[in-house]
Amino acid sequence: MPNMSNTKVPSPEQDPKVRAHNFEEVTSGYTAEMAVEEATRCLNCKNRPCMTGCPVSVQIPDFIREIAGGNFEGAYSIIRETSSLPAVCGRVCPQERQCESKCVRGIKGEPVGIGRLERFAADHHMQNGTEDVQLPPKNGHKAAIVGAGPAGLTCAGDLARLGYEVTVYEAFHTAGGVLMYGIPEFRLPKDIVQREVDGLRRLGVKIMTNMVIGKVLSIDEIMAEGNEAVFVGSGAGLPRFMGIEGEGLVGVCSANEYLTRINLMKGYKEGYDTPVLRSKSVAVVGGGNVAMDAARSALRMGAEHVYIIYRRSEAEMPARREEVLHAKEEGVEFLTLNNPLRLIGDDSGRVCAAVVQKMELGEPDESGRRSPVPVEGSEYELPVDTVIMAIGTSPNPLIRTTTPGLEANKRGCLIVDEAMMTTKEGVYAGGDAVTGAATVILAMGAGKAAARAMDEYMQKKD
C-alpha cells in the first residue's frame, strides 16, 4: 500500500546552534527504515512526470520502487546507469526545481523526497556494496577531457564505459572541480567526491592534475597526442565584481577565492596554515547558492555577524530554499532589497564599512524578474571587516585565447552547435564553460550529451 502522507519523512539534522560552529555534514541522511517509508510515498505514475525534470534521465520510479522493496543495491545500480555522481547529486541538486517539482504528490502536499532517496542509495552502496568493476573492451579510440568538474567527469565516465581511452586534464591538484573547491564540507564532504572520482579511475579513466591547459599544454598539443576529440569542461571560475569604490581594500574578496581557501586548501581544519580572512563582521553580496555557502562558511570560521546583502526580495533569490532556511537557522542575517554603493576603508587599508542603499521592486527586467529601484535618501553604513562578492562568475579566457579557431560570445562563453562541437573541429564543450555559472546537474547533463556526440563523431572516423 502506498504511504499517503502529505509530508516527506524528515531527514535528521544537526542542531543549528551546534552545526553553525563545525564543518560536519548538516544532515545525516535517511536510515533504511526511513528510506523505505519515504519510497512508499511514490505512486509509480505510468507517465513518469518526475523524469522530465532530470537532466541526466535517471529512471526515478524504478530506483524508488527498488528501495521500497528493500533492494538498495538494485536501486543504486539503476541510478548508476545514467548518473556518474549519485552521492553528489543526492546532496546538491536543486530537486525542488527539477524532478520533485514534477512529482504528482506535490500537488496536494510535499513531493516524494527523490534527492534524499538518491543520496540514501548512494551512501548505502558506499558503506555496504562491492566495488567490482567490469572494464569495457577498448575500442581503439582516444579522447581527452579538460576540467575534472561535474561536466568533465560525467563525460569521461560515459566515454570510458563505451570503451574509449580517456585522459582528464585538471588545473588544480585535486580532481572534482567546483565539487571540491566551491561547495563546503558541511554540504558535500570531500571524501564523498573522492570516492566518486576513484570510481572513474577504476573504469580506466586517467586523471592528470596540475595541468593548466593553455599554459602547460595547449588544446592543439592534446589533439596531436592522438586524441580524436576533446571536451572542454573547464567551468566558470573567473569571479565578477561590482566595480564600486573600495573593492580593492584588504578584506574584500570573491566567494570563489574565499571558498577555495577554506575547502581545497583545508582552511577549515586545525593545523593547516591556510591564509583565510578571520573576520568578526562579514557582508556577503549576492543571493545564490554560492552566497549561502560563503555566508555559512564565514559563521563556521568564527564570524560574530554575517549578512547577506541582496538587491531583490527573498522570493526572488536563486538559492535553494533549503539553503536559505539553513542559513537563517544558523544565524545569518538577511538584508534583502539592499545594495552596496561603495566600501569604506580604515587607516590600515582594510574595509571597515559598506555604504548600503535600500531598494524597492519596479518593473520586470529582461529575465522577467522585477527590477530593483533605489529608494532615495535611504543610504546607511553597515560596519563590516570583510566583504565577499558572490554575484556570479564567467569562464576563464585562458583556453579560448590560446586555441586558434575557438570562438566565444560576448560573455566569454564558448560557442557550440547543436552537437556541442565548438567552432574548432573535434573540440566539444559543455557545462559552465558554455552556459556560464549554473548547477552541478545541468553540467552533468551537458557532459552526457557531449559524450554521445563525441562517440558519434569518432565512430564516423572509422
Image (spheres, rainbow, N blue to C red):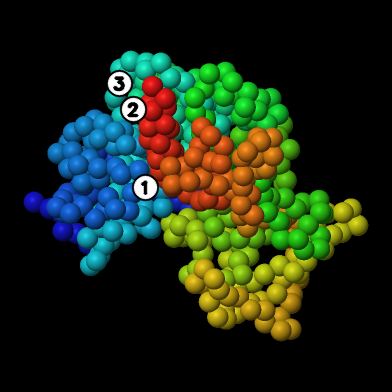
Is 106 placed left or right of 368 in the picture?
A: left
Residue 174, how many percent across, how many down? 57, 28
Q: Are marks 3 and 1 in contact (CB under 8 Å)?
A: no
As helix, strand or loop, the secondary structure at mark 1 comes to loop
Q: Amino acid at mark 3?
A: Thr
Please name the residue that numbered disc 1 is placed on: 55
**Eye-nearest disc, 2 or 1:** 1
Which of the two residues, 13 or 236, is positioned nearer the viewer here?
236
Which of the two residues, 73 or 447, is positioned nearer the viewer here?
447
Please name the residue that numbered disc 3 is placed on: 130
Please name the residue that numbered disc 2 is placed on: 127
Mark-to-mark CA distance, 2 and 1: 27 Å
Residue 136, how many percent across, how many down? 33, 18
Quarter of the figure with residue 414: top right
Q: Rate crowding at label 3 as few (under 14), some (14 to 19) or many (20 or more) other CA atoms within 10 Å.
A: few
Residue 51, how many percent across, how many down? 27, 50
Mark-to-mark CA distance, 3 and 1: 27 Å
As helix, strand or loop, the secondary structure at mark 2 comes to helix
As helix, strand or loop, the secondary structure at mark 3 comes to loop
Residue 47, how many percent across, how many down? 17, 54
Question: Can residue 432 be seen here?
Answer: no
Which of the two residues, 155 or 170, is positioned nearer the viewer here?
155
Q: Amino acid at mark 2?
A: Gln
Q: Rate crowding at label 2 as few (under 14), some (14 to 19) or many (20 or more) other CA atoms within 10 Å.
A: few
